[in-house]
Amino acid sequence: LLYVAQGEVGHATSSQCEVVVSDQATTCHIIALRSCSYLPLVSLAHVDGACYEDCIRRMVRYHLDFAAVEHRDEKKTEHSSPGKLVVEVHVVGGFEDADGTSRNISTFLISLLDRIAYEESDSIRLVLKTCAISSMNDNGHGCPIGRGLGINCISGDVFLAKVAHQMRGPAVELRSARIWSNSGVKQLSLVHEPFYNSISIDPFHFEPPSCAGTLLSLSDKMLLKLTSTSPEVEEDDFCDGIRSTLRFMSGVRTSDIFGRNLTHPVTFGRIGTNDWKLREVSSAKGQ
C-alpha cells in the first residue's frame, strides 16, 4: 500500500504496490490516473485547493514520459499500443459546503482536465471513469459520502477508502507540517516514483504558528472552527491529528530534520509489505 497525504502526489507501478490510496478529504479532492504501457502506472494526488494547474499537468505528462521510456526500451506487452496512450481518470471529493469551496475545486479540476485532453489529443486520451464530486458526493444533508479513494494498480478497480493511522506510512506529522508551511507558491509534494521504492520528503521550512499554545489548549469544537474548512463534517480523529502535528512542530527544528541549509531530503525505504525504514543520510544535523 502507498498512502498519499493532503498536498502530496505519488506515482507507482504494479510491481511496487497493490494499492495507492488517500483519505480524510472533505472539501479536498482526490484524483487518480492509471495507464498501461509496459507496467500499469498509477498516479494519485490529494488536492486541497484550485491552485495546482502545473502540478496536475505534470501528473498527466508523467504517464506520457513513462510510456515513452518503456517504448524506447522495447519492453512491450499486450497492453502496449502504437496509438494514443489511454489514461483512466478518477476524481472523488467535496460536498455541498456552504461557502462553495468544494465546487470551486471541482470546477477547476474538471475544466483543467478538459483543456489537457484537448491540448494533448494527439498523444493521449483521458477517460473519465469515476466522478463523485461536490453535489454528486453529498449525502443530501451537507456531508460528503466519499472521503477517501483507493485504486488497485493491477486491476484498475477503485473504491472508497478509510485508512487506519498506522497504515498511512512514515513521518505522518512531518508530512502534515507542510500544510502549515508558508513556502511561497503552493505545489503538490512528490513523495513516490516508479524508479525508487521509497517515500521521499523534500526539505521545507516549518515552524509552529505563534498561536500553537492557544490552539493546543482549545476544545475540539473551537479547534475545528479555527483549523478546518468544513468543521461540521470532519472525522472524529481530526483534532487529534491537528494537535499531534502542532506538538511535532513545537518540539523539532527544521534543521534537525533537513540539515542547517535545508539540503537533505528525508527518505524511507519500504521494508516488507507496509513497513518503512529511515535511510541514513550523511550527518543531516549541522550540514
Image (cartoon, rainbow, N blue to C red):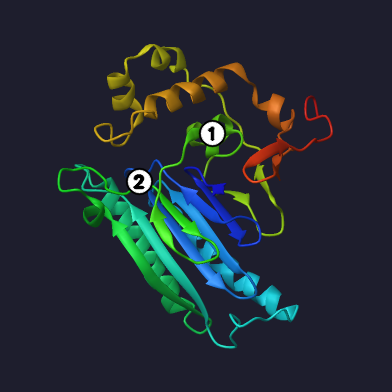
Image quadrant in which you'd find residue 158: bottom left
**Quick check: 243 left or right of 35?**
left
- Looking at the rendered image, the quarter that the C terminus falls into is top right
**Quick check: 270 left or right of 116?**
right
What's the residue at 26%, 53% (across, down)? 137
Can residue 116 be seen here? The reply is yes
Task: Farthest residue to the bottom: give it.
Answer: 82
Q: Does residue 246 sit above or below 275 in this rendering?
A: above
Q: Which mark is residue 147?
A: 2
Q: Position of residue 136 (x, y in %)?
A: 23, 57
Structural crowding at the residue carrying mark 1, measured as other residues with C-alpha within 10 Å and reported as few (<14), some (14–19) or many (≥20) = few
Q: Position of residue 242 (x, y in %)?
A: 43, 26
Q: Does residue 201 sit above or below 214 in this rendering?
A: below
Q: Secondary structure at mark 2?
A: loop
Q: Amino acid at mark 1?
A: Gln
Q: Amino acid at mark 2?
A: Arg
Q: Is there CB contact under 8 Å for labels 2 and 1?
A: no
What's the residue at 43%, 57% (across, down)? 31
What's the residue at 32%, 43% (across, down)? 26
State how many labels appear: 2
Residue under label 1: 166
Q: Secondary structure at mark 1?
A: helix
Structural crowding at the residue carrying mark 2, measured as other residues with C-alpha within 10 Å and reported as few (<14), some (14–19) or many (≥20) = many
The one of 36 and 177 positioned closer to us in this rendering: 36
Nearer the camera: disc 2 or disc 1: 1
